[in-house]
């Protein structure tokens, strides 16, 4: 994590940005600072800021699409984030990648104001715990660092965070932040962009850098805001590209953008509250991700009742498989399974 994300004394921004529509505080204070995040580290950053945003809305301790945050008596936060959220669109659940990304994220120290005009350096995390059986990770965060995330989240919207987390590339995520920050076409030196994206060593050749940038801009087209790229030369007679003009444009507006927001929120449902074994059993029974999210309260209650009868065994998954076999001849198998689970919950109450 960069100290630029905390300190208000960040490097000067281009004039167009000073008057920009800063949808995200992070867009202004971090996007134009030099730092190198992996995609997983970026998603950790988004998840923490999002949960700080939700806590500020009075939803601390509640389950959200990106996890939940709880506070102990010392005001330290325990953040639970589903691993599938951090992996993004990748189907791999490689726990080595998660552990390495958490280590790398925690190596990025932050400077925190002490309230007396001074600063002290801290690591973002106090501790981390990967729970493979539940498919999530718990991050313990000191209250001083958490206040920085809360401060950073003031200008976030729920859709902006969820949209950014869907991109595969950290470069696309940063371009999305830039697109949300700019209000008109702006020019940037190639050397400046290559430096803030930390691509000097990897793509020292301008042609390679531009190809990488265009691939990320192509992925950006999947979002609600995109950008057009124009290459600028030092003088008309030169073939050397020295600057780029980035022009933001909206992909969705009005009702179309509202529909895109609802699709995004549905994709980031609360199915992570169920264990991976139970989600697999439900999928085999014909339940889609949206079916699980729509009935999450009932399914979680049934899971708690059934698994609580014999701790350590997946009785819920076994019950779903049993009901699936019995519902094969029914006209509406999913509805019949839901009705059977309702009877179990009602009887227990």
Image (cartoon, grey):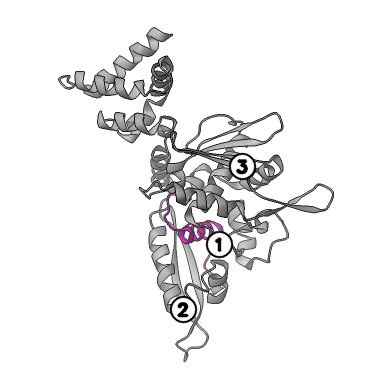
Answer above or below: position of 212 versus 62: below
What label sits on residue 206 in the rendered view? 2
Which SS type dominates the magenta stretch? helix
Neighbor class of circle 2 (other Cα within 10 Å; few <14, some 14-19, many 20+) is: some
Neighbor class of circle 1 (other Cα within 10 Å; few <14, some 14-19, many 20+) is: some
Cα distance in 3D space between marks 3 and 2: 41 Å
**Quadrant assignment for the C terminus:** top left
Please give the name of the residue rendered at 51% of the width and 31% of the height, measured from the top-left corner: 63
Q: Position of residue 37 (x, y in %)?
A: 54, 58
Q: Which residue corresponds to mark 3?
A: 127
State whether residue 5 appears in this view.
yes
Side of 275 where 146 appears, left or right: right
* Element class at badge 3: strand
What label sits on residue 21 in the rendered view? none
Q: Which residue corresponds to mark 1?
A: 36
- Tag 3–tag 1 contact (CB < 8 Å): no
Q: Position of residue 252 (x, y in %)?
A: 41, 51
- Tag 1–tag 2 contact (CB < 8 Å): no
Q: Mark 3 vs mark 1: which is more N-terminal? A: 1
Please give the name of the residue rendered at 60% of the width and 53% of the height, measured from the top-left corner: 26
> Start and end of the magenta stretch?
164-185
- Quadrant in the rendering for residue 319: top left
Pick whichever, 43 or 278, lies toward us.
278
Residue 165 forms part of the magenta stretch = yes
Q: Mark 3 vs mark 2: which is more N-terminal? A: 3
* Element class at badge 1: loop
Side of 324 where 69 appears, left or right: right
Neighbor class of circle 3 (other Cα within 10 Å; few <14, some 14-19, many 20+) is: few
* Element class at badge 2: helix
């Amino acid at each position: 994590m960069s100290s630029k994300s905390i300190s208000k004394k960040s490097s000067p921004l281009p004039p167009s940005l000073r008057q920009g529509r800063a949808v995200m505080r992070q867009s202004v204070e971090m996007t134009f600072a030099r730092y190198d995040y992996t995609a997983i580290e970026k998603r950790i950053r988004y998840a923490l800021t999002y949960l700080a945003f939700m806590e500020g809305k009075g939803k601390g301790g509640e389950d959200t699409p990106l996890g939940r945050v709880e506070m102990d008596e010392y005001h330290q936060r325990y953040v639970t984030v589903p691993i599938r959220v951090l992996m993004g669109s990748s189907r791999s659940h490689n726990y080595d990648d998660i552990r390495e990304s958490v280590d790398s994220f925690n190596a990025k120290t932050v400077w925190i104001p002490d309230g007396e005009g001074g600063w002290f350096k801290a690591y973002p995390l106090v501790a981390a715990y990967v729970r493979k059986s539940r498919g999530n990770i718990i991050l313990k965060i000191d209250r001083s660092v958490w206040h920085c995330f809360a401060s950073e989240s003031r200008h976030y919207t729920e859709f902006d965070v969820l949209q950014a987390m869907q991109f595969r590339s950290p470069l696309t995520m940063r371009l999305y932040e830039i697109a949300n920050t700019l209000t008109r076409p702006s020019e940037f030196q190639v050397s400046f962009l290559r430096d803030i994206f930390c691509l000097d060593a990897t793509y020292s050749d301008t042609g390679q850098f531009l190809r990488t940038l265009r691939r990320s801009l192509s992925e950006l087209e999947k979002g609600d805001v995109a950008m057009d790229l124009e290459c600028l030369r030092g003088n008309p007679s030169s073939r050397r590209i020295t600057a780029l003009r980035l022009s933001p444009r909206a992909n969705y507006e009005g009702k179309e953008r509202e529909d895109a927001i609802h699709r995004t929120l549905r994709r980031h449902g609360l199915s992570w509250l169920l264990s991976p074994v139970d989600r697999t059993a439900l999928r085999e029974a014909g339940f889609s991700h949206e079916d699980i999210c729509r009935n999450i309260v009932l399914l979680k209650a049934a899971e708690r009742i059934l698994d609580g009868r014999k701790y350590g065994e997946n009785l819920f998954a076994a019950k779903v498989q049993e009901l699936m076999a019995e519902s094969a001849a029914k006209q509406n198998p999913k509805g019949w399974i839901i009705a059977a689970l309702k009877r179990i919950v009602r009887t227990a109450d």
